[in-house]
Amino acid sequence: MSNVPAVESAVGTAGPHGGGAEREFTVEARSQWGLVRRRFFHHKLALGSMIVLLLVILLAFVGAALWKYNYTETSPRVDGRGAPTLDAIPFIDGDGLAVGEHPFGQDDIGRDYFALTLRGTQQSLIIATLAGLVGTFIGTAIGAIAGFYRGRVDNILMRFVDIGLTIPLLLLAAVIGRRAGDIPGLSWLFGENSLLLFGKDPDDVPVIGDYFGPNSIILLGLVIAFVSWLTIARVVRGEFLSLREKEYVEAARALGTPNGRIIRKHILPNAVGTIIVNATLLISAAILIETALSYLGLGVRGDDWSLGKLVSSYQNAFTTRPWLFWWPGLFILVIALCINFIGDGLRDAFDPRQTRERR
Amino acid sequence: MFFFILRRFAVTVPILAASTFLVFGLVTISGDPLAQYRTSQSPNRAQIIAQARDRLDLDRAFPARYWDWLKGVVRLDFGQNKGGQEVYPILKDALVTTFRLVMLATVLSIIIGLVIGIISAVRQYSAFDYGTTFASFLFYSLPVFWLAVLLKQFGAIELNDYLEQPTLSFTVAVAVGVMTGFVISTVTGGPWRRRLPVLAVTAVISTALLLLADSTDWILNPGLSPVAVGVSAAIAGVLATMAFAPLSKRTVLVSGVASAMIGFVGSLVFHGWLDEPSWVDLFQLLAMSLLVGVIVGAAVGGIERATAIKAGTTATVFVGLVVVADEFISAWKPGRTIATVGPQTANIKGTFWERMIDYASHQVLPSLALALIGLATYARFTRASMLETLNSDYVRTAKAKGLPATQVVLRHGFRTALIPVTTVITLSFATVIEGATITERVFGWSGMGTLFVKGLSDVDPYPVMAFLVVVSVSIVFLNALTDVLYAYLDPRIRNE
């Protein structure tokens, strides 16, 4: 299910802080981050993808709030079938640019599909970001400890990773989905009287689905994170195994630097390229995993929507109302593609060894 | 090396035990297996429930049940499902179905992915590189079931329309020819001045071939004449040699071409075997062709014996593939071939090759959906890994001492680049079984994924466990295999 690729290339072994400027050169000193930013902004595809992604995020969160239709309300269907009124290519039928009443059309009961798609995009983005961030955090912590301390610690942690890799995400999602209410900590966090509702009545909060309780998407994100940290942990461990043998780590150790500080201040900044690149890949994979889970009926449920749920709910409408299938799919594709391109740009920025041109 | 392998596989046993125990616990808590009986209206409800309770052994605590189950699995007894059927035969059928789907997809995606990766690394920043990079990102970002539904809607219908009336108009032939020329020309590299003639020549040749095929009704009734097989055998011999040694190594070249020719002659001699072969026959032919390669290589190889044997076996296997492909396409007849539901036509009768055509026509779309995504991953990784090795010093040295480009790329670059790529391939193969769940669902195959998802939604523990045993065994086993392959490809790891 998860096709999280692991970028196992050593990245950015240059010092993190670039060293102070030497006064006799008039050249301005650049920090590592400055170099990375510069290389990234010269990567046109990555930059363009970032702009597109930002626009999508803006559309999903701000646009949905400003849009005249809500994703729950129904309205009479415009031309019987509820076909999209968006006209982005003015040359074909000569109507010119037009947004119209329902730019993405309407679904079978007359809900505005633009609002639905934006709602799904919001949810999918939240799930994926959460899964990516939490997964990266756990994976980095475990991988760093395993790689740095080696020996028995490494062995035990990596066997846990091995075991974790054999547990299918589907099973985990099903178990947690069905039994979340019975697990004390989880029901406390995600149940009817969840802390995350901040004292509000669950009925006032948009219902997110009966499957995981009122905070299903947060739990869904965590479930995906629980599966995806494994790859990151492996990659970070490999990175730490090689970085811990470097001269500057030896120097820090000779000075009596405590282990925790060596990990945080000396090794981690040099592994950050690999980690960030893998985090982006994790987020794009999480989007796809979420859609897959929803397709199998184990993702977002109830009255709420995610992009995956939209596609799977309307896949049988393909012959009658194809737009119900196209729009959410295109959004998934665009988001995942943008994140992957950004990840690629970041990889090139952190590790220019694969690019032949100087940037 | 032997003890390394032994040690590595010994570690897998406790992991498997822990993993199955954990998963058994998860399956146990995932729901109430008797829920569907509790709401039943039938008068003998209590009896049904008691029966199911007894069958699933629900009266005992879960560690005891796990222990019994584990003892059973060692004897290949996977327990019974809720309906009282033995799980093992169901599992076997499901496994065969899924394996067919996954194997083809994986083999295709590895071969094509590696080739694309190598070419785009060698021709970095060419049109080919940009094109394949974009395509792999695109496939990589596609949700599997979205792609599968699209393939089903468009691939099946359009292709079937074409296959019913497989003729080519002049414009289509020219367009395809020019496209082929363009793709080939982007692969050759160099400035436009050098690439344009390549484009022109390949475009003209492929257009001519297409028109010839159309005018002789080859598309309606495809097949290869012995002459075509012979020519491709000769080409295979030379190519196989080029993959392993420079053409100036006479002994290797002789071995490659001679093996290919013997393979060709053999294909004429053993032609009768291929009319209605069994799988055993095909394996015997494969073994024979390998043997021919080994014997010829050993006989003429001299000091280059190992390389000569490699070239010889590669050549003969390639010839064998051409011959089999010939039989395969000869059995095809125009019609709406591509099927979208299920793994094969029910109760199909016909010759071996007609059954193969039927299998293939059911398999092409689901395998394509899986393969496209795997292919994208492999191509990206091979490219990245190749770029790293191609920019390293020893590759420059190899170029500087005058080795032919193929040798530098394949033996110095690719062999090293293969190390990280193996990890990705073996690791992702196991997840493909899980990923196939969705593809199976879209195309209505009942394989492992169906077994799992159905068991999960019915809260039927033993089928779910059967799926999980297969998946975790393959994951753990492939992890171990990765380490062993690593140690084989990179001897430094063994000595640590």
Image (spheres, coloured by chain):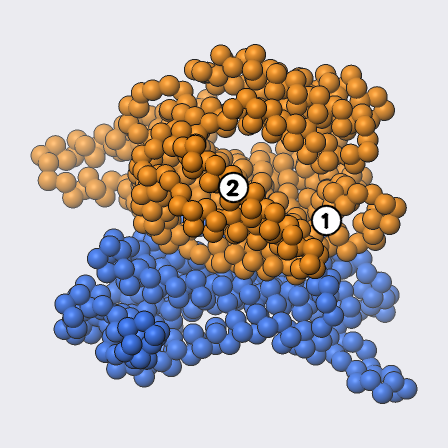
Chain colours: A blue, B orange
Q: Residue furthest right?
A: A24
Q: On the same chain: label 2 and label 1?
A: no
Of residues B127 and B216, the one nearer the viewer is B216
Of residues B302 and A121, the one nearer the viewer is B302
Vertical side of B36 occupied by B178: above or below: below
Q: CA distance from mark 2 to mark 1?
A: 65 Å
Which chain contains the residue that carries disc 2?
B
Residue at horizontal 31 percent and vertical 38 percent from the top? B164
- Mark 1: amino acid: Gly
Vertical side of B449 occupied by B56: above or below: above
Say which residue label 2 marks. Answer: B208
The C terminus of chain B, quarter of image: top right
Which chain contains the residue that carries disc 1?
A
Position of residue A279 in the picture relative to residue B38 (left or right): right
User: Residue B268's spot in the image, x, y percent?
Assistant: 56, 15
Q: Is residue A198 visible?
A: yes
Residue at horizontal 25 percent and vertical 65 percent from the top? A303
Of residues B12 and B192, the one nearer the viewer is B192
Q: Residue furthest left?
A: B43
Answer with the quarter of the image where residue B219 lies.
top left
Mark 2 element type: helix
Say which residue label 1 marks. Answer: A151
User: Residue B230's spot in the image, x, y percent?
Assistant: 60, 24
- Mark 2: amino acid: Ala
User: Residue B402's spot in the image, x, y percent?
Assistant: 85, 45
